[in-house]
Amino acid sequence: MATDARKLASSVYLDQTQSKHPAVSTTPGNITEEQRAALDAALRVDQAGEVAANWIYMGQMAVLGRDPKTGTLIQEMWDQEKKHLAVMDKLQVQHRVRPTLLTDVAKVAGFGLGATTALLGREAAMACTEAVETVIGEHYDDQLKEIEWLPDDHPSVPLLREVIKEFRDDELEHLDIAVDNYSQRAPAHALLSSVVGLGCKVAIEFCKRV
């Protein structure tokens, strides 16, 4: 299985010919209850975050999708988030993680955030993306440190780390795209970024536990 190239990490989960490989079909059995709880919390919040991200972009597309340039840009980022969610769904099943009970809340809140900021204009929509991806990038960085203790002797663990690194880099790329498309020209940019960022951090903590 080719997992040495980071760009290929997530594609392993989408390759049907690899579906029986232990790296994508089994979960570590030699970890403590504390380690299992931490792994569960990590994947639960990651899946919830990808659900919310998809609905944020859905809300933005509902408002700005007809604009040729902006609609194309949002669609490209949304397509990447769709792939992220598909992989997270498989990881959740593989590691037998209960999804958050707040999935429906994440969908409604995500769509509302995406649509509301898009109604404020293209720059505000990009500011929303900038704020969300800043928090998510930091979250994935923190998560990589938190799962350093997972044993490497199970094939799913190195693959999981590479998937998280890949997704982190994707999210940071979305952040750069937002900044390049004038997110910081949005009205009340600092306030908007603070509110959205705080909301993301609160949501992360809730989804870890619920």
Image (cartoon, rainbow, N blue to C red):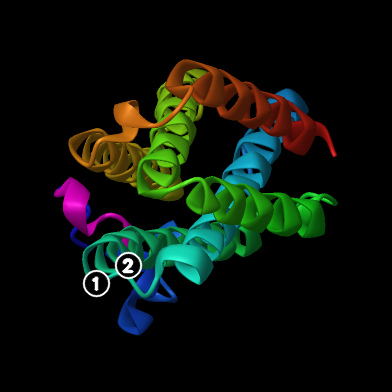
Q: Nearer the viewer, residue 82 or 18?
A: 82
Amino acid type of the residue tagged 1 in the rendering: Pro
Q: Which residue is mark 2?
A: 71
Quadrant of the frame with the N terminus: bottom left
Determine the residue positioned at 67% across, 53% down: 112
| Residue 85 disc label | none
Q: x, y percentage for residue 197? A: 56, 25
Kindly report the secondary structure that dominates the magenta region of the rendered protein. Answer: helix
Q: Which residues are magenta?
A: 5-10
Residue ranking furthest to the bottom: 16
Amino acid type of the residue tagged 2 in the rendering: Gly
Determine the residue positioned at 24% across, 40% down: 173
Q: x, y percentage for residue 201? A: 63, 24
Q: x, y percentage for residue 89? A: 58, 63
Q: Is residue 75 above or below residue 38?
A: below
Q: Secondary structure at mark 2?
A: helix
Q: Is residue 77 left or right of residue 118?
A: left
Q: Is residue 45 left or right of residue 10?
A: right
Q: Is residue 14 above or below residue 96?
A: below
| Residue 68 disc label | 1
Q: Determine which quarter of the picture holds residue 169.
A: top left
Residue 9 counted in the magenta span: yes
Check contact, mark 2 vs mark 1: CB within 8 A.
yes
Between the residue at mark 2 and the residue at mark 1, the CA separation in whole angstroms equals: 5 Å
Determine the residue positioned at 44% across, 75% down: 20
